[in-house]
Image: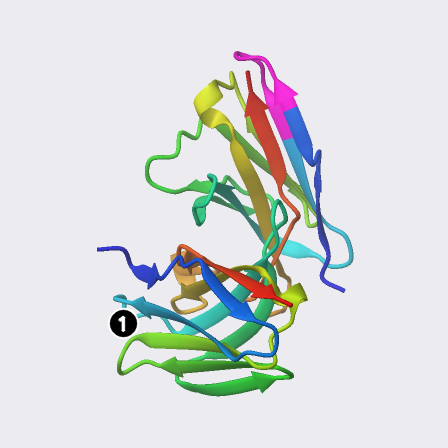
Amino acid sequence: GAVVSQHPSRVICKSGTSVKIECRSLDFQATTMFWYRQFPKQSLMLMATSNEGSKATYEQGVEKDKFLINHASLTLSTLTVTSAHPEDSSFYICSAIRAGGWGNEQFFGPGTRLTVL
Amino acid sequence: QKEVEQDPGPLSVPEGAIVSLNCTYSNSAFQYFMWYRQYSRKGPELLMYTYSSGNKEDGRFTAQVDKSSKYISLFIRDSQPSDSATYLCAMSEDAGGTSYGKLTFGQGTILTVHP
């Protein structure tokens, strides 16, 4: 149980295009999901908190108009990187908190590697 | 100073060795402490989860939390080559309010267990 999937696992795009990444909790409902970014050999940096049915909360320094987050249902959150540029190339990872579970026990997706040419 | 400090290693040990991984932190509000294992190009996998000070054991893994020293540890006994991965400590404050679920990660320690 407690499986989180991400799609796509890898994407390569041209500079200026938009890319959508999906995060799904497969066997549980997630009222809260998180989006992280991880650069090579670095730790995970929280980008935003996504709550079902409400606007996402972004961490300081993260542009909300560039990284659009939609949490349309209890099992799906999407991150859209708009007008992507090479500096947006990174490993994007989502996590989910199981509804009714411990607030700090998170389950992570396998990540999406974004490469912007 | 970062909120959570973790020696990035790399750490290389022979199979069967006892591995000790550590993190220190500065935020006294942290109450939940976790250890994650991350294989290359994969998402983190939760290994251990503890609340407040104390020890917790799960198979070959033991997590220790010393809140008075702001220091947490993960011990791996009888280490195996399959344990080779990056180990991340993570912490969070009270489960409620605006900090709900927000984790602060250490830099990660790269561990290699060689046969």
User: Residue type at mark 1?
Assistant: Ser
* A19 drawn magenta: yes
Residue B12 in the image: above or below residue A33:
below
User: Can residue A77 be seen in this snapshot?
Assistant: yes
Q: Position of residue A104 (x, y in %)?
A: 51, 66
Q: Nearer the viewer, residue B81 or A36?
A: B81
Q: Is residue A100 left or right of residue A69?
A: right
Residue A110 in the image: above or below residue A113:
below
For label 1, count other residues whose C-alpha is less than 10 Å away and answer few (under 14), some (14-19) or many (20+). Answer: few
Question: For numbered disc 1, what is the local secondary structure?
Answer: loop
User: Can residue A104 be seen in this snapshot?
Assistant: no
* A105 drawn magenta: no
Q: Nearer the viewer, residue B73 or B68?
A: B73
Residue labelled with disc 1: B28
Q: Position of residue B78 (x, y in %)?
A: 61, 81
Q: Is residue B81 left or right of residue B36?
A: right
Q: Nearer the viewer, residue B47 or A51?
A: B47
First to last magenta residue range: A12-20
Residue B4: name its quadrant: bottom left
Q: Position of residue B105 (x, y in %)?
A: 42, 57
Please give the name of the residue rendered at 58% of the width and 13% of the height, measured from the top-left corner. A14
* Subunit ID for the residue under disc 1: B
Residue B83 in the image: above or below residue A3:
below
Please give the name of the residue rendered at 38% of the width and 42% of the height, measured from the top-left corner. A59
Residue B58 in the image: above or below residue A5:
below
In the rendered image, the quadrant that contains the C terminus of chain A is top right
Q: Position of residue A111 (x, y in %)?
A: 62, 43
Please give the name of the residue rendered at 31% of the width and 69% of the height, measured from the top-left corner. B24
In the rendered image, the quadrant that contains the N terminus of chain A is bottom right
